[in-house]
Image (cartoon, rainbow, N blue to C red):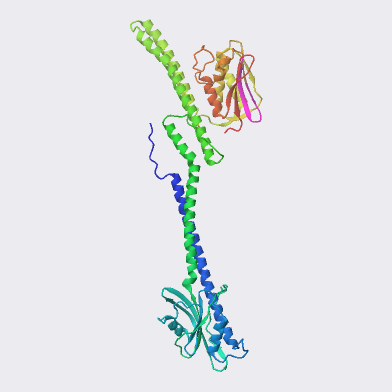
Amino acid sequence: MTTERRVGLTVQNRLTITVAALSVLTLSIVGLILYTVESNNVSSRTTASMSQEVDEMRTFSENGIDPQTGRPFASVDEILSNFLAQNRPDEDEVLFAFLTDGRVLYQGEPKGLLGSSGEFEKAVAGAAENGGEISLTIDGVEHEGFVLPITGTEAGAGTTTDTQTAPTDSASRTEGVGEVAGGAAATNGAGAFVVVHNVSASHSDLVQFMQIYVVVALAAALLIAGLSSLLARRLLSPVTELRRTAQSISGGDLSSRLETKGHDDIAELGHTFNDMLDRLEAAFEAQRRFLDDVGHELRTPLTILGGHLETMNAEDVGDVEETRAMLLDETDRMGRLVEELLLLARARRPDFVRFAEVDLSGVVSDSLAKAKGLGDREWGLEVPESLSFHGDRQRLTQALLQLASNAVEHTEDGQKIVFGARDDSDSVHIWVRDEGKGVPDEIAEDIFDRFCRGSTDGAGFGLGLSIISAIAEAHGGTVVLDQTTIGAQFRMILPKGQK
């Protein structure tokens, strides 16, 4: 009797959780890579845009010619105001011109840069002398910029630019729109061109994209987990059925079989399991029949022994001697029966036969010489001069002598019994043929079963042919009853390649 054990986390659940975890991990890694790459791209585009504006301003100031009038600029303020009037900043970018008279011109949307705190003006003033990059955060908004000092003389005496290197990058510009405006700012009599980029605004699109990605990734992970759960349930359904079938077998039901579909590994497992059940059922059935037969065969001599012991007159010497002789005969019969049963039991052990290269012609000839002492028969031999075989010499001799004993039992004095052997491309054939009464048709199919006798005569137990069949099977072959017009011929067919 078996009890169903409580199943904790099933294989299906573990597979689903594993696939879901791997999906989330993979999507997280992909998201991190996307964010890192795109963030670097945004930073590169920002740097490239500011670098381009600074390079254009430097070229414009070094040229020193007003494109509208064709005359040199009269002052630094004129250079700065004309450049801002002719250029439009990129998106999230603002261009500033700090004039020598203290005014500030800008192109774009300052968005708090020119507020009352003055942080932006302080940052520009700190870099106005030598130029360079600035970075500041105003009202939680991060900005990055570059200051390019512009110096020169009034009335177009020529201009020079500071040699501070501007940020460089190869990324492409983005198009933007802006306007010219004026405002108050403190300077020290020198001009400066400033380009400022709103870093927070540039990254806002990236943040929005990543938020959408997270939602899509979670939906994808849930979809993958659901599909993996359905797929795992479908793929593992044969395993669940296998467990239930195994539990029913533990309860004693050997008739259950798995329903197999397809040609994959799981289906092959089902076929293998069904084949195992077939063998188990056959083995259990054979075991039941074997026990029934053994019980029947042993019950008879035990009954005889018990009956004679009960009726024996201990004071009658003749009766005692007669009973003793009869009991010894019955115990000998039981001893032979047990010995044959033990031989059949050992036939399933791997060391039942010991393979070696043997001269099969010599084995058959020697067996015939030994068999001649079994009875006064006309013995014959049909073997080639030389025939080698890889097998167990003693077991083959035992099988031949058992066949000879059966043949002697079913023939009369002077009848012919022939030992023979031959080979073909794949097998060797060994037989014993007699001219006796033959095997009745009604038992021909069951003649190799245990305790099946060819006749009710004789003292055998019906195990001889079972032993011969076991020896043949241990060599990888079989034993058959050939069709003959006179007598019977039993032939062992053994493969040549058996090791």
Where 60 falls versus 273 (above or below)? below
Comparing 368 with 302, the one in front is 302
- Quadrant of the rendered image containing residue 468: top right
Q: Residue at x 63, y 19 (%)?
A: 381
Where 161 falls versus 200 (above or below)? below
Number of callouts = 0
Q: Residue at x 61, y 91 (%)?
A: 71
Q: Is residue 424 magenta?
A: yes
Q: Quadrant of the C terminus?
A: top right
Q: Residue at x 55, y 83 (%)?
A: 85
Q: Position of residue 171 (x, y in %)?
A: 56, 72
Comparing 384 with 473, the one in front is 473
Secondary structure mostly taken by the magenta-highlighted segment of the chain: strand
Where 252 falls versus 50 (above or below)? above
Q: Residue at x 58, y 24 (%)?
A: 479
In the rendered structure, the answer to whether residue 65 lies left or right of residue 143 reads: right
- Quadrant of the rendered image containing residue 138: bottom left
Q: Position of residue 179 (x, y in %)?
A: 53, 80
In the rendered structure, the answer to whether residue 13 lies left or right of residue 443 reads: left
Q: Is residue 158 magenta?
A: no
Residue 439 in view, yes or no? no
Q: Position of residue 349 (x, y in %)?
A: 49, 30
Q: Position of residue 459 (x, y in %)?
A: 49, 13
Q: Quadrant of the N terminus?
A: top left
Where 362 falls versus 308 (above or below)? below
Query: Which residues, given as a range, are shown in magenta?
Result: 420-434
Residue 331 in view, yes or no? yes
Comparing 472 with 116, the one in front is 116
